[in-house]
Amino acid sequence: MGSEQPEVVPRPGRRERGFRAAALACAASALVLLVVHTLSWWSLGPPAPAVLPPAGEVLEGKAPFRFGVVGDSHSNLDVFEAVLRGMKADEVSLVLHMGDLVAARAETEYDWLLHELDEARLGVPFCTVPGNHDIIKWESNPRVRCRLFSRSFGPRQYWFAYANALFVGFDSAAEKCKKEDLQWLDRTLSRLRGQFEACFVYIHVPPTDPRAGCSHCMESGAEELGHILKKHRVTALFAGHIHSYLETAIEGVPVYISGGGGGGPDEPFGPFHYLLCSVEPGGAFQVEKKDVVAASRGDYWEHRLLVVWPRRLGVLFLVVLMAAGVAFSVLAGIAQRRRLRGAKPVPTS
């Protein structure tokens, strides 16, 4: 009676090992990404309330008072928190932000910023206008163009008053001034300017770029804007967009360009900063540039982990990873079956 001959089972080949390694890598990556998405969802939680300006309101207050100006934070919360701490220490009565609040136009970016503002407990009005990174630039309908911005920070342009000063937020995020927007600005100033001793207009893209050979400014509408500012004796115009600090003028109206709230610096290079502005009885006005240094980069890494990576590596990417892992597992199984079918009996003497 013959005995069964043992078989020699070939060792897994390079292809089979590669398939198994790829399946394991996809599974591990999908697990890590799932953890990141879960952390992001858990950390952000329910959306923080919108931070709306006092549009159309006359706020109680007395001169002298101080207000802060900052622009282009670009989701750099380490710098932005340092700016807010400085403004709180300076006891400002309100904060103007020149736009480009977020690094990318996404709901999670705005939710992250709203949570940070909620935790900052600023305690004074936070009044901003949209920047070019906050809008869908190619969209002609302003409501659609500024949808995410308006969802979190209110109207794209508006006015309010504090003490003896009128403040007007104007939308130049698309790098041009449309005729209907200029007409709105002219009507608003015609109706209200005479009631206040000082008047400040704040925008994102400046009407001109005072740097030699640079044109980081409006493509059209600057001349018309200048005429309106001069006509209504606007005290000063504030703008951002250029990540530096520059002073210039348009039609005799002082222009302060301050984009040092967190974005990568532009020439002339300088430290991150904000402006501390003082308004005296009678409308006298002073500006002081105040430099800031971020105390840490903790928010930078937290932002990348909980906001940037989940946004760039979304649920679709997670599904693709899982599907790829299954596909590689199937291919490894097929390679294994072929290897086992090729097993040969061990010859006996």
Image (cartoon, helix red, strand yellow):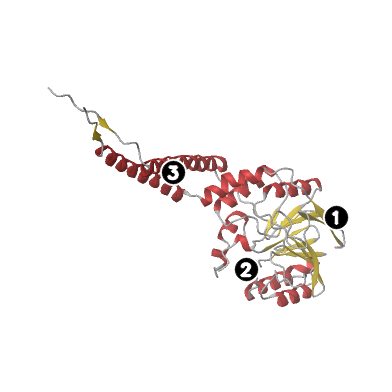
Gap in Å between the C-alphas at discs 2 and 3? 42 Å
Q: Are marks 2 and 3 in contact (CB under 8 Å)?
A: no
- Give me the disc on residue 40: none
Give the amino acid type for the residue marked by disc 2 in the picture: Ala
Q: Earlier in the sequence, mark 2 or mark 3?
A: 3
The answer to whether one can see residue 196 in this image is: no
Residue under circle 2? 174
x and y percentages locating residue 334 in the rendered image: 30, 43
Gap in Å between the C-alphas at discs 1 and 2? 35 Å
Report helix, strand or loop for mark 1. loop
Give the amino acid type for the residue marked by disc 1 in the picture: Pro
Give the amino acid type for the residue marked by disc 3 in the picture: Cys
Q: Quadrant of residue 127?
A: bottom right
Residue under circle 1? 64
| Nearest to the observer: residue 344 or residue 261 | 344
x and y percentages locating residue 45 in the rendered image: 55, 42
Gap in Å between the C-alphas at discs 3 and 1? 62 Å
Dot 2 alpha-carbon crowd within 10 angstroms: few under 14, some 14 to 19, many 20 or more = many
x and y percentages locating residue 149 in the rendered image: 60, 58
Quadrant showing the C terminus? top left
Dot 3 alpha-carbon crowd within 10 angstroms: few under 14, some 14 to 19, many 20 or more = many
Horizontally, residue 157 falls left or right of residue 31, namely: right
Report helix, strand or loop for mark 2. loop
Residue found at the very far front of the displayed protein = 349
| Nearest to the observer: residue 190 or residue 110 | 110
The answer to whether one can see residue 291 in this image is: yes
Residue under circle 3? 26
Closer to us: mark 2 or mark 3? Answer: 3
x and y percentages locating residue 220 in the rendered image: 67, 76
